[in-house]
Amino acid sequence: MNEIWYRYDDPWTAGEAPFCQELPVARHTAKCVVFDNYGAFDRFVLKDPNGRRYAYPTKELALKSYIIRKQRQMQHAANTLDRAKENLATAQMIESGALVPAKKEFSLS
């Protein structure tokens, strides 16, 4: 079987083009594709076209998946940055005396 599935992934250095992994298919099961030469363990990927997968049967689908992953990554990073800015502003207000820190009971139970 000479079937190949694809996955785009990040380069090691920012600003470089993403690289496309070509993953040779070892076998098919009823619901999965199993990749050859993936290391010590088999890598199973669902055939179900709904939802996310590790790899895709075409480069086009793999690239769409990569774009969606990067959009989600950017949204998570933006949310983290927003939270950090709010927490920094609050900490600076506490430092200046404009705000009293909240007290929270600590319990291991």
Image (cartoon, rainbow, N blue to C red):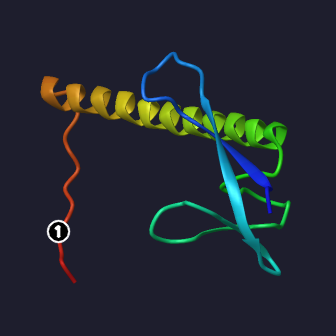
Please report the residue visible at 20 percent of the width from the left and 44 percent of the height from the top. 101
Asked if residue 56 is positioned above or below residue 70 in the image, the reply reads below
In this picture, is 80 found above or below 1?
above
Q: Answer with the quarter of the image where residue 90 lies.
A: top left
Q: Give 27 or 56, whichever is nearer the viewer.
A: 27
- The image shows residue 83 at horizontal and vertical percentages of 41, 36
Please, what secondary structure does the residue beneath circle 1 have? loop
> Given the image, on which type of amino acid does mark 1 rest?
Phe
Instruction: Give the side of residue 80 with respect to residue 54, left or right.
Output: left
Q: Position of residue 64 (x, y in %)?
A: 78, 37
Residue at the (54%, 60%) spot, across then down:
38
Quarter holding the N terminus is: bottom right
Q: Where is residue 16 in the image (x, y as percent from the top left)?
A: 53, 18
Instruction: Pick whichever, 68 or 37, lies toward us.
Output: 37
For the point 62% across and 63% down, the residue is 36
Q: Residue 94 sits in which quadrant?
A: top left
**52 relative to 99 in the view: left or right:** right
Residue 95 at x, y percent in the picture? 14, 27
Furthest residue to the top?
A: 15
**Viewer-nearest residue: 73 or 37:** 37
Q: In the rendered image of this protein, does residue 32 appear above or below residue 23?
A: below
Q: In this view, does 83 lie to the left or right of 90?
A: right
Give the residue number, with chain letter if any, for mark 1. 106
Q: Quadrant of the C terminus?
A: bottom left
Q: Crowding at label 1, few (<14), some or many (≥20) Cα neighbours within 10 Å?
A: few
Q: In this view, does 91 lie to the left or right of 53?
A: left
Find the residue positioned furthest to the front: 1
